[in-house]
Amino acid sequence: MDIIIKIYESLRPGGVIVVPIILISTFMWMLIIERLFYLRRQKQDDLDLKEAVKMLKGKKMYYLPGKGLRSRVIRGFLKEKTGESKLDQSILYLCAKRELPHIKRHLSIIGALASISPLFGLLGTVMGMVTTFNVISQFGTGNAKALAGGISEALITTQTGLLVAIPGLYMSNFLNQQAKELKNRLDEMIMTLKRYI
């Protein structure tokens, strides 16, 4: 509880602009955590290519282990396959394509939120400078306490925006890389399984 009070006291001089930055940060990290768990689940407890080929050949149709990406694609394919080679290849491709939106979900939102937060910080900087110039126009440069309020608002919002943006952009790039690897695994499986259909 003490740490929350300290954080509040350090951010309070930043003014109202700090509130949307904190909301952006909270929402962004909720999406990041959801993506991390999703991507981890897709890689864990999944079929390797040899098992996928066995499933396709019908040697293990009664039991399909795992809840990962390849397992779901094979399950979908086995439910819809017709026995006709060309049609089955299209069905396999379609089953894999259904997974793509799940792989890419929220990634663009995370990147956008990470990019927006320094802009809010810049807005706070401008507002802090306007406050400082208003104080100078009213009292001159003799009121140091009033000047410090505007400068403090400017610097705290800039700092907060950057503190949200830097790890957010890093995580956005990391998650995009993980999603790309997952998509490559999916493409590899499709190319391998097409030979056995």
Image (spheres, helix red, strand yellow):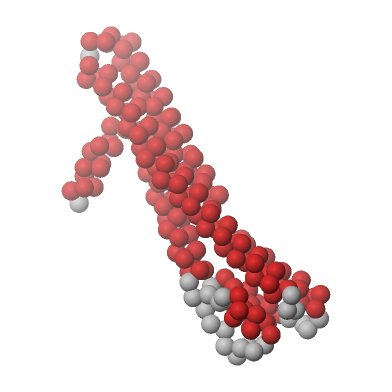
In this rendering, would 8 be left or right of 57?
left
- The residue under the point 25% across, 19% down is 146
- How many numbered dots are placed on residues in this image? 0
Residue 62 x/y as whole percent: 60, 90
118 or 4, nearer to the observer: 118
Residue 82 x/y as whole percent: 77, 82
In this rendering, would 92 be left or right of 30?
right
- The residue under the point 33% across, 28% down is 155
Residue 98 in view? no
In this rendering, would 169 be left or right of 155?
right
Residue 172 in view? yes
89 or 18, nearer to the observer: 89
- The residue under the point 41% across, 24% down is 126
182 or 141, nearer to the observer: 182
- The residue under the point 48% across, 69% down is 41
Look at the picture and state if 88 lies above or below 22.
Answer: below
Look at the picture and state if 16 lies above or below 194.
Answer: above
Residue 124 falls in which quadrant of the image? top left
Q: Residue furthest left?
A: 2
Quadrant (top left, top right, bottom left, bottom right) of the C terminus: bottom right
